[in-house]
Structures are given as structure tokens and as C-alpha cells.
Image (cartoon, rainbow, N blue to C red):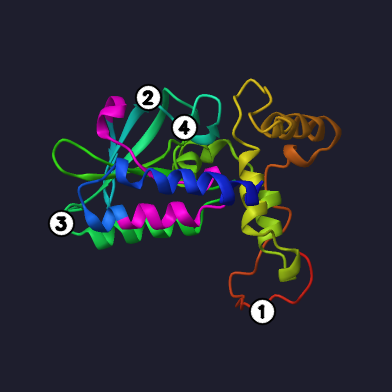
Amino acid sequence: MISAWREVYIKRLESEFSNWTSGNKEIDVFIRKNQLKALLHTEVIEWIPYNRFQRVKYLTEGGFGKVYTATWIDGYIAYWDFSDEKWTREDNNETYCLKILDNSSNNIKKFLQEIENQLKFRGKRAISMHGITKDPKGNYMMVMQYAKEGSLREMLNRRYHTLSWNHLMNRCLDGNSLRRPTATQLVKDLEKYAMDTDGNLNSYGYPPEIVKQVKEIERIEKTTEFYSRKSCPYVTHPESCYTSRLIDQKPI
């Protein structure tokens, strides 16, 4: 599949270089260079005229600039249709994210470096970068996948009080570093909570984690007297002096 893309589709992209321009030489070179490096259609970024977006709406503002949502009429490149002699595209008329960096029109190098940073970490679980556009005010914008749940931080802020952290924290604090979860494993664990409160399966197909935990608590309450304890079963001496120590290499 990769060789087919390299041998056929890259040539198609290259033949279209003269058909478009961003109006900025640095941006044109950047896009063309990245198109020629693409191994799959998901790695293609392109110049997207602003008039291909509809229903542009302000979403939020952060330290880097402003974020908008918009409907992309065409969607991103999927493959070349040899019968119709044109690109077939996917996810057309879907919502995408448009990001403006402060003073992007006056600092193209910084703008392109930000995109380069995004491209370095693209993958199955990363936000997709689709291209660059320019609004009527002259601001260059990154065209990206729209994350409906927002950032991981925003999702955690919304769901913090409904999450049970005991199991996850025990794994993260395991004395043996080899048993601690990787970043990818943490993402998978956190995705388990992306579900509705009625206990329906989430979009990832995981069991309803929160409902499972609630039922387990109810079971424990019925079979033990732990939750009926009203005070701590031990006391500390008022004149005791407590010190800390290093955790030995054993599971917590």
C-alpha cells in the first residue's frame, strides 16, 4: 500500500503544484515538501482555500491564539479515482478545527514550526493535521481534526469527580518501574471513562467502567462491615515523630 502511494499518488500531487498557492513562498514550499514525504494519504497536508469552509464559529482562546470550528465541504484526500480522474475524499461536510497562532502572518517560521511539531506526533491516537488555510483578515490557520471531547485536560476536568483513581494510581506508583503503565496504556485506561452515565458502551467498545465500579461497591457494602466503621481503628501518639523513607522495589 505504501509503495503504491509513493509510486502513483505522489506523482499526482506533484503534478498539481502549479494549480494552487497560499500566496506565501515559505508555506508553499513547506506543503509541497511534506506532500512528497507522505507515505499514506493520512499524512498528506494541503493548501485549502478558505471558501471551502462553511459555518465558521469561534470556539475558544488559549495561550497560542484562537480556535474556531468549521464545516469543510470537501474533506481530506483519500485516494485517486482513475475512472473520474480526480481525488476521492473522506469526511466531507464534517466539522474540523481551525487554529490561528498569534501574529502568524508576521511570523511564518513560528507558524510552520508549530505545524512541524504537530506532524512529528501524528498517529492513530493523535489529532490529525490536514492542511493550512487563510482567513479574510490575512491570518494563516491550521486545519485539524476536531476533538469532540476536547483536550485530555478538558475531559478530565469535566469527569474528575466521577472517576475512580485507586487502581490507576496504584499502577502509576508501583515500586517496580517496569510495571508502571506506558503513556499509550494510560490513554487506553482514560478512554474507558468516555461513556454516558446510563452505563451504555462507549465508542471504544469497552465495558461501562463506572457502572462496574458502582456495582462492586454495592456488593462490598452488603457483604462486609467495612463501610459501617465510623472512626479510624487506630490512634497516633501526640508526641510521635514521623519520618519518610524511600519506597523499596515492591508493588504497592
- Residue in view at x 86 percent, y 33 percent: 223
Q: Which of the two discs, 3 and 4, labels the residue nearer the N terminus?
A: 3
C-alpha gap between disc 4 and disc 1: 42 Å
Q: How far across and down, in percent of the image, does residue 224 sit?
A: 84, 37
Task: Examine the rendered structure and indicate whether residue 143 appears above or below residue 233.
Answer: above
What secondary structure is marked by label 2? loop
- Label 2 crowd bin: few (<14), some (14–19), many (20+), radius 10 Å: some
The one nearer the camera, 169 or 233, is 169
Q: Amino acid at mark 3?
A: Asn
Residue matched to label 2: 73
C-alpha gap between disc 2 and disc 4: 19 Å
Q: Amino acid at mark 1?
A: Leu
Q: Nearer the viewer, mark 3 or mark 4?
A: 3
C-alpha gap between disc 2 and disc 1: 58 Å
What secondary structure is marked by label 1? loop
Task: Examine the rendered structure and indicate whether residue 108 appears above or below residue 243.
Answer: above
Residue matched to label 4: 148
The quarter of the displayed image where residue 55 is located:
top left
Residue matched to label 1: 246
Magenta-colored stretch includes residue 49? yes
- Residue in view at x 72 percent, y 35 percent: 213
C-alpha gap between disc 3 and disc 2: 28 Å
Q: Which of the two discs, 1 and 3, labels the residue nearer the N terminus?
A: 3
Q: Nearer the viewer, mark 3 or mark 2?
A: 2
Magenta-colored stretch includes residue 220? no
Q: Which mark is residue 106?
A: 3
- Label 3 crowd bin: few (<14), some (14–19), many (20+), radius 10 Å: few
Q: Which of the two discs, 3 and 2, labels the residue nearer the N terminus?
A: 2
The quarter of the displayed image where residue 100 is located:
top left
Q: Nearer the viewer, mark 4 or mark 1?
A: 4
Q: Which of the two discs, 2 and 1, labels the residue nearer the N terminus?
A: 2
C-alpha gap between disc 1 and disc 3: 52 Å
